[in-house]
Image: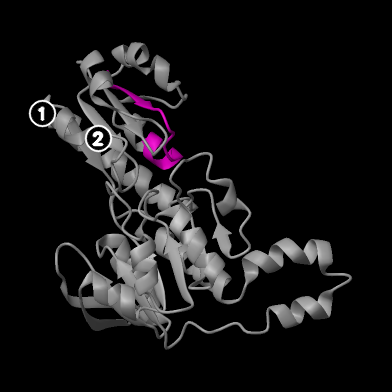
Amino acid sequence: MIKILANDGIDPIGKQLLEDAGFQVDTQTIPQDQLAEALLNYDAITVRSATKVRAALIDACPNIKLIGRGGVGMDNIDVDYARGKGVNVVNTPAASSLSVAELVFSHLFTGVRFLQDANRKMPVEGATKFNDLKKAYAKGIELRGKTIGIIGFGRIGRETASVALGLGMNVLAYDLFPFSGNITLNLQGGIKVDIPVQTVSLAEVIAQSDFISLHTPFADKPILGAAEFDAMKPGVGIVNCSRGGTIDEEALINALDSGKVAFAGLDVFDNEPTPLAALLTHPKISLTPHIGASTNEAQERIGTELANLIIDHFKK
């Protein structure tokens, strides 16, 4: 019997699919320093973002035939090394796109109406300073008619563009691989509308956007640093639901303090799970703890897609 360790968990639907196909699935979480010994008893491992599958672990477990990543990025897996050893590596790049895109707009709506600060202050000052708070948050803005710049135009970037276009926003997008084509809006009643979009230069996205959302893989150095913030419009909003390390966090704090950046929405951080304290307490930052794909619907899609990939591999 094929034995699979789902070390970061798997949706019950995915687990059931695997078990119905004759696999044994264990969902206990084994600490990183004990994985090498434990994996000697398994044929495959699935992970999310917490568990790391590096070269040393791959070498220590020659019996492992497949590594599955429930999600998009595979920064926590030495993918090329594993494949070079004959280990199949699979992920589920499309399953969480809508959930991440919706979180982007949760942060955007929060930022343009000061919800992150209001939610902190209302419980403390709402009863005594209600009118003062009302005045403090009286200069919100609407998203409709504004320009969102999307850095990284893969599946999640395009889903973010779809939501933006549906809200009546303008879209500027940048990607290492230029794109020119249609973004399809799925409207109520099964109506589909195609809207043409093409990528532009990174400099254009940075200089002309009212809001900027990052959707890139891990980068060796930040994509947005002090020079990029200087080149942005005054009052820009920044959202990062992609990868920690793609924004220079110290430069972001400086830009927020100076007013160049009006607000930021962060779901990912340089040093997870202990983000920089100055980020956690900043009144202009909306915060979530890396939950981009954490919806019931996305987890079902991830579990189903991952299970089918594993079944296809071992049944060949």
| Residue 147 in which image quadrant | bottom left
Q: Is residue 134 left or right of residue 51?
A: right
The N terminus lies in quadrant: top left
The C terminus lies in quadrant: top left
Q: Which residues are magenta?
A: 1-16
Type of the residue with mark 2: Ile
Type of the residue with mark 1: Gly
Residue 290: give x, y in percent of width and height. 48, 49
| Up-down relation of residue 194 to residue 285 (above or below) | below
Q: How many neighbours does mark 1 have within 10 angstroms: few (below 14), some (14-19), or many (20 or more)?
A: few
Q: Which residue is mark 1?
A: 84
| Residue 128 in which image quadrant | bottom right
Residue displayed at 34% across by 65% down? 227
Q: Which residue is mark 2?
A: 310
Please, what secondary structure does the residue beneath circle 1 have? Answer: helix
Residue 292, can we see it? no
Report the front residue among 173 and 183. 173
Based on the picture, tell me whether residue 15 belongs to the magenta stretch.
yes
